[in-house]
């Protein structure tokens, strides 16, 4: 049942991720470092122990704090606290004869049933248990940050240590306080028939504290590890599934530590599993008033000019078959969106800028063919300019640019048209002579009757340069 639930949840999550990924682009690159996460979870729980497991359940809360995050980095690291409550159950369909050391069933406790001697004692029992666990644990969580930034898919692995308060009981007395007549069970029947017969026989009350639990609940230190797969539905909300394994480090969690066929100790320790669906909310911190004032003032304290690093796309030029693509850059030594200029094909484009991380993110709508993206950042010490060329070619087929249409110059031979000569109009700086106090300057121009980058020669102080962008008209 639990495996079927996990399979269904996985399919639903994959479908959700596929549809969301197609509809959205890089909207999760804006996560600031140091965020908190608050989560709730619920699902199925069961034991891997001496008694055959039956489906149980669990529910819990998590509270995490981001410790390491770098935009574009491979991994994030969080510390997370967890509270988890589980109920696990088990029942055997075969008789157990190793009861001599089991204080819950051998009559040694006085108030418990005696299946070894006395009136109607068969010398064996069909074991069952119900276990309650309350866990408080601390976990270290590694998350694939770059995968999350690019696709919204959240893949995490974690390990931790917890303090577990656990109690186990067994149903071995009927409503009158007498032991069950296990001798009437036909052990040659099928597993399903035996389980059905036992269900009709028992009253469902787990009235007897199991072996090693005569004094009540026990406290144990237990390590755990798990995997999670989720999707960032919005920048502040994610949904996912996970599986967690906890090692008990002893063999008594189910109330049985002996082999079923004799009184020897079993050789493996118990562990319990928890498969769950979780919902999580990211909580971002707020800047202090002093930081807000610094953001408005925008005067860097280190005395250096801005530095721009374009994180995505990495190739230049970059070819995309999607009309909308994500752009991300990191700008150092600057605070405040007002000191950043961001353009697409020479026109201002929408973007988000995060002071705490220096991250600029934008979802660009491209025109077919060549697109020029440019970022300019300035402060009192200078400025920096970085750009990328993005070529949009629809997936339906290669883009065939419309040839530049030129007006022919009249000729005595109409079969040999002559095109107009190129025309250059420098738009920045607007004056023929311009003074500046910074070492970087922008040059922009409109060039007519030229169709490619190779037809342009650009020199500075007699030195030819090739690091310029040209989209057919705009230089």
Image (cartoon, helix red, strand yellow):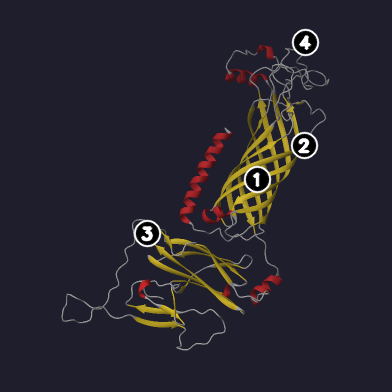
Query: What distance separates the C-alpha of mark 3 from that of mark 2?
Result: 60 Å
Q: Tell me if residue 421 comes above or below residue 38 in the rendering.
A: below
Report how far apart the C-alphas of labels 4 and 1 lie in the structure: 53 Å
Task: Say what secondary structure mark 4 lies in.
Answer: loop
Q: Give me the C-alpha separation between circle 2 and circle 1.
A: 20 Å
- Determine which residue is flagged by label 3: 394
Q: Say which quadrant the C terminus sits in.
A: bottom left
Residue at image position (67%, 55%) is 66
**Spatial distance from mark 2 to mark 4, Cα to Cα?**
38 Å
Decide: few, some or many residues near mark 4? Use Cα within 10 Å; few <14, some 14-19, many ≥20. few
Mark 4 vs 1, N-terminal side: 4
- State the residue at coordinates (59%, 73%): 306
Q: What is the C-alpha distance between the residues marked 1 and 3?
A: 41 Å
Q: Which mark is residue 158?
A: 1
First reached walking from the N terminus: tag 4 or tag 3: 4
Q: Which residue is mark 2?
A: 220
């Amino acid at each position: 049942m639990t495996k079927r639930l996990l399979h269904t949840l996985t399919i639903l999550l994959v479908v959700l991720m596929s549809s969301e990924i197609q509809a959205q682009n890089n909207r999760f690159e804006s996560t600031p470092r140091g965020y908190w996460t608050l989560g709730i979870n619920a699902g199925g729980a069961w034991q891997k122990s001496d008694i055959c497991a039956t489906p149980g359940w669990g529910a819990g809360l998590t509270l995490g704090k981001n410790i390491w995050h770098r935009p574009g980095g491979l991994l994030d690291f969080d510390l997370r606290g967890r509270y988890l409550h589980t109920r696990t159950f088990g029942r055997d369909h075969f008789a157990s004869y190793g009861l001599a050391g089991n204080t819950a069933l051998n009559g040694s406790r006085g108030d418990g049933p005696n299946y070894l001697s006395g009136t109607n004692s068969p010398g064996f029992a069909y074991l069952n248990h119900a276990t309650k666990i309350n866990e408080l644990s601390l976990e270290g969580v590694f998350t694939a940050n770059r995968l999350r930034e690019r696709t919204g898919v959240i893949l995490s692995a974690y390990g931790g240590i917890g303090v577990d308060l656990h109690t186990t009981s067994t149903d071995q007395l009927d409503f009158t306080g007498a032991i069950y007549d296990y001798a009437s069970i036909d052990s040659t029947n099928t597993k399903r028939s035996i389980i059905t017969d036992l269900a009709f026989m028992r009253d469902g009350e787990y009235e007897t504290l199991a072996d090693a639990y005569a004094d009540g609940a026990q406290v144990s230190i237990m390590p755990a590890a798990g995997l999670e797969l989720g999707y960032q539905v919005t920048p502040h909300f994610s949904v996912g599934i996970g599986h967690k394994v906890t090692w008990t480090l002893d063999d008594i969690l189910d109330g049985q530590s002996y082999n079923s066929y004799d009184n020897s100790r079993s050789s493996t320790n118990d562990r319990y599993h928890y498969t769950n669906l979780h919902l999580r909310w990211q909580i971002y911190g707020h800047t202090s008033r002093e930081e807000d004032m610094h953001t408005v003032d925008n005067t860097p304290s280190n005395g250096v000019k801005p530095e721009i690093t374009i994180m995505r796309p990495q190739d230049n030029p970059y070819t995309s078959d999607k009309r909308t693509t994500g752009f991300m850059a990191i700008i150092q030594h600057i605070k405040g969106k007002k000191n950043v200029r961001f353009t697409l094909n020479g026109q201002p484009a929408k973007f988000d800028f995060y002071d705490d991380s220096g991250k600029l993110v934008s979802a660009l709508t491209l025109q077919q063919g060549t697109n020029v993206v440019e970022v300019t950042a300035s402060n009192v010490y200078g400025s920096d300019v970085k750009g990328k060329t993005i070529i949009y070619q629809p997936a339906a087929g290669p883009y065939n640019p419309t040839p530049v249409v030129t007006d022919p110059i009249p000729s005595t031979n109409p079969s040999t048209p002559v095109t107009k000569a190129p025309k250059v109009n420098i738009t920045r700086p607007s004056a023929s002579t311009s003074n500046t106090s910074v070492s970087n300057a922008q040059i922009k121009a409109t060039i007519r009757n030229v169709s490619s980058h190779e037809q342009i020669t650009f020199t500075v102080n007699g030195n030819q340069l090739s690091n310029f962008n040209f989209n057919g008209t705009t230089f």
